[in-house]
Image (cartoon, helix red, strand yellow):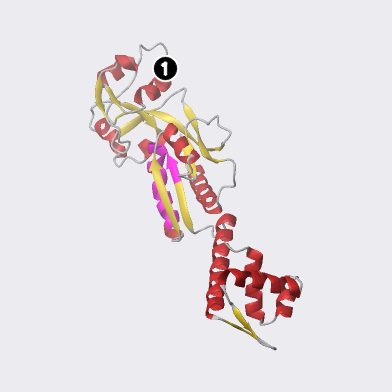
Amino acid sequence: MHPPQWLQSFTALAHTGSFTRAAERLGLTQAAVSQHVRQLEDRLGPLLIRRPRAIELTPAGTALLQYCAEIEEADRRLAVRIADEEACCGDVGLVTPGSLGLFLYPLLLDFQLAHPGLAIRHRFAPDRETLAQVLDKRYDLGIVALKPDDARLAATPFAEEALELVVPAASEVRGWQDLQALGFIDHPEGHAMATRLLSRAFPGNPGIATVPARGFSNQVGLLLEPVARGLGFTVIPTHARRVFARPDAIRVIDMATPVVDTLWLIHRAEWPLPARARRVADYLHEHISKRTIR
């Protein structure tokens, strides 16, 4: 690697055709410019032919000038990338819970259509995996249900989301016995969510483990299909219910004491969030805040 000041002196000399003008452009002495060029020639061989009133580049000098131009262009691209002036170009990675992700993904596609220079990567993941993906710099942004206790992560409130008791459209739920008669459609976080919500709605209940299991799915987009067909009830976040294609086949039971979680937007705290990632986050936050979460 050649010292940048040597290359700057050579480039200025090649462009001005004069040691004097090159020195004036760079704010150096003529002797300094001459020394830089000689040091390059000691490494690379003759770079220019010195004439009384002009200089002429040798083939090696022409190749070096092209190399200097490539270095300048690479520096410019790096500066743009670091400064993130291209807020609507480049890659943005986002990791979300499955329920919220189903709701956000069409919004992400709309944003990408409006900004074709962006490439948006979206991944569904539970909190633990989301934290790991953001910490490992594989994704710019993550959304989690629990605020992380990690100094390496910045966390800001993104949205609120309620848990919902969802039953077949024709079902009535007046007490715990009605839930036991329906049966439970489980999912990876089903027991935890059901326990949190039903303990408030039905104080003193014997627990979700006493309700017969009628099915299980780890695909949040399909979870309400057995409920819609009358096979049981489930407890899920609001957004998982909102994206279901057959809302007339299900019913949400109103809760006198709802359970509402704050969802947190996270990113690495040690450096500024890229402008393009900030724009995506602001766009999603704006659109989700316009809609009723509960």
Residue that appears at 42% across and 21% down: 196
Q: Position of residue 260 (x, y in %)?
A: 48, 29
Q: Is residue 120 left or right of residue 176?
A: right
Camera sees residue 225: yes
Q: Which residue is mark 1?
A: 199
Magenta residue check for 236: no
Q: Which residues are magenta?
A: 94-112
Q: Is residue 105 above or below residue 164?
A: below
Residue that appears at 63% across and 78% down: 14
Q: Nearer the viewer, residue 24 or 186?
A: 24
Magenta residue check for 97: yes
Q: Nearer the viewer, residue 136 or 74?
A: 74
> Dividing the picture into quarters, in which one does residue 11 lie?
bottom right
Camera sees residue 292: no
Label 1 crowd bin: few (<14), some (14–19), many (20+), radius 10 Å: some
Q: Nearer the viewer, residue 162 or 132?
A: 132
> Dividing the picture into quarters, in which one does residue 175 lie?
top left
The quadrant of the rendering that contains the C terminus is: top left
